Image (cartoon, rainbow, N blue to C red):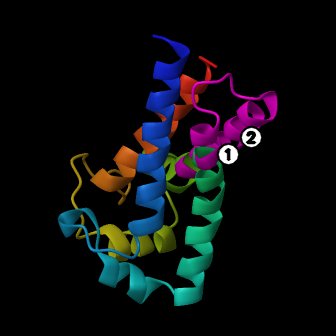
Amino acid sequence: MSPESWQAVAIALQALQLSILLFHDWVPLGSLTDVQAVRRANTPTYMLVGTAINSVPVGFALWRSVADFGHAYPHGLKIAMWLIYGILFAGELQSWWIPYFLGASPSKIERFQKMFGRTHAFLPVRHGIVPNTLHVILHLATFATLLILTQF
């Protein structure tokens, strides 16, 4: 693939991730989200801070990726993107996949069941946790972004 094609795919993945991060706790998306359950489990301030912490870096990376489209990405942008998506993926592993495969505290299991127990999931429950479909999509997009960064 051409460099521009890799950039276009990276931009599309980042736009998907930003959309999910901005809206999944705030906008009902059918069985993909349970906004009311998330609101019962978290204060509005907690939700705003969490949305900002996750979305602002991704929004910055997306903005810079679009601004530099068609040109070689500056070294600083490449480093920033590796850090942003590396940290995001590490958080996804820590929050979802490590508890899913290795187990979690009873309080984490209870919290996840309250917030996500009514959302769509296609994986089997393990250790009382199942990553829901929307989070699996987000995590796959993050991982794919990291893979694509190897092409720049």
Residue at position x 59%, y 52% from top? 58
| Label 1: element kind | helix
Residue type (three-letter) at the residue carrying disc 1: Ile
Give the total number of marks visible in the rendering.
2
* Disc 1: CA contacts within 10 A as few (<14), some (14-19) or many (>=20): some
Residue 5 position within the rendered picture, expressed as x and y whole percent measured from the top left: 46, 20
* Contact between labelled residues 1 and 2, with CB atoms less than 8 Å apart: yes
Residue 146 lies left or right of residue 144; in this view the side is right
Taking 77 as reference, is 131 above or below it? Answer: below
Taking 137 as reference, is 121 above or below it? Answer: below
Residue at position x 36%, y 74% from top? 115
Residue type (three-letter) at the residue carrying disc 2: Ala
Q: Is residue 72 magenta?
A: yes
- Furthest residue in direction right, as rendered: 76
Q: Quadrant of the N terminus?
A: top left
The answer to which of 101 and 96 lies nearer the viewer is 96
Residue linked to disc 2: 80
Residue linked to disc 1: 84
Q: Quadrant of residue 54?
A: bottom right
The label number, if any, that marks residue 53 in the structure image: none
Taking 43 as reference, is 142 above or below it? Answer: above
Residue 84 position within the rendered picture, expressed as x and y whole percent measured from the top left: 67, 45
Residue at position x 24%, y 67% from top? 29
Residue at position x 38%, y 53% from top? 135
Q: Is residue 68 magenta?
A: yes
* Disc 2: CA contacts within 10 A as few (<14), some (14-19) or many (>=20): some
Q: Which residues are magenta?
A: 63-92
Residue 75 lies left or right of residue 33; in this view the side is right
